[in-house]
Image: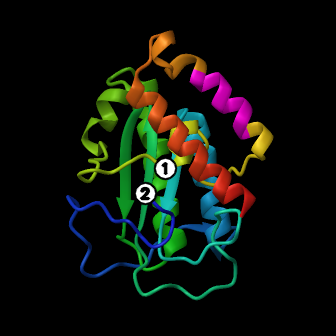
């Protein structure tokens, strides 16, 4: 299960030795983490991604978003985990010396990738094939991935149970699913309810 904190850097990706200063800004001011996340969420929505988690070393609020006003962590890298068409992908970035700039770089990468698809040269599946997230051995999906919630959504217990009933109707062995899919759904529900109820 991928967590938003601390940073879950993909093992297959080498780290940048000397991060550089970026030129991302908002009206001439350095980009804030909140602005960068807003850009990223917009691109993910346009991409049609689901189950996304932005992993970094920024401390989080209760809603899963980074707390504002905190100092840059020593490791400013970020890794975006998400699904497209049920396939897990990961876009890590540590090229820049600020977390906000690394988040903005991922947003720009997604924007550029969508532009390539519009030109008809390649489709999204082909373009993101090289960014497939390799699960660690024995890794299980987070409850958010199983239910299709992105990293900042916090459903109520009633909303979660409605979604569970809908998914159970598809995953149950009697409905064409499997025991494994149903077990994964039940475990995710228990984990989610525990987190929701605190």
Q: Nearer the viewer, residue 136 or 151?
A: 136
Q: Which residue is mark 2?
A: 2
- Mark 1 crowdedness (10 Å alpha carbons): few <14, some 14-19, many ≥20: many
Q: Is residue 165 visible?
A: yes
Q: Which residue is mark 1?
A: 142
Examine the residues drawn in magenta and state their main secondary structure.
helix
- Cβ–Cβ under 8 Å for marks 1 and 2: yes
* Mark identifier at residue 165: none
178 left or right of 23?
left
Q: Residue at x 54, y 38 (%)?
A: 186
* Residue 37 image offset from top left, x and y in percent: 61, 60
Q: Is residue 20 above or below residue 158?
A: below
- Mark 1 and mark 2: Cα distance apart in space: 7 Å
- Magenta stretch encompasses residue 164: yes
Along the line of sight, the residue nearer the viewer: 115 or 7:
7
Q: Magenta stretch: give its range.
A: 160-168
């Amino acid at each position: 299960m991928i967590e938003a904190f601390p940073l879950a850097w993909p093992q297959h990706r080498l780290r940048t030795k000397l991060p550089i200063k970026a030129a991302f800004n908002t009206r001439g001011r350095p980009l804030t983490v909140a602005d960068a996340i807003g850009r990223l969420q917009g691109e993910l929505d346009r991409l049609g991604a689901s189950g996304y988690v932005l992993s970094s070393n920024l401390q989080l609020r209760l809603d899963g978003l980074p707390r504002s006003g905190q100092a840059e962590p020593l490791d400013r890298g970020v890794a975006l985990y998400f699904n497209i068409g049920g396939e897990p992908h990961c876009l890590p970035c540590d090229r820049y010396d600020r977390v906000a700039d690394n988040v903005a770089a991922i947003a720009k990468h997604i924007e550029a990738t969508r532009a390539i698809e519009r030109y008809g040269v390649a489709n999204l599946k082909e373009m993101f094939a090289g960014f497939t997230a390799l699960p660690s051995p024995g890794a299980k999906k987070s409850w958010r991935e199983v239910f299709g919630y992105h990293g900042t959504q916090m459903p109520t217990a009633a909303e979660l149970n409605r979604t569970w009933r809908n998914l159970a109707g598809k995953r149950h062995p009697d409905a064409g699913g499997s025991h494994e899919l149903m077990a994964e759904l039940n475990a995710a529900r228990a984990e989610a309810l525990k987190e929701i109820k605190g």
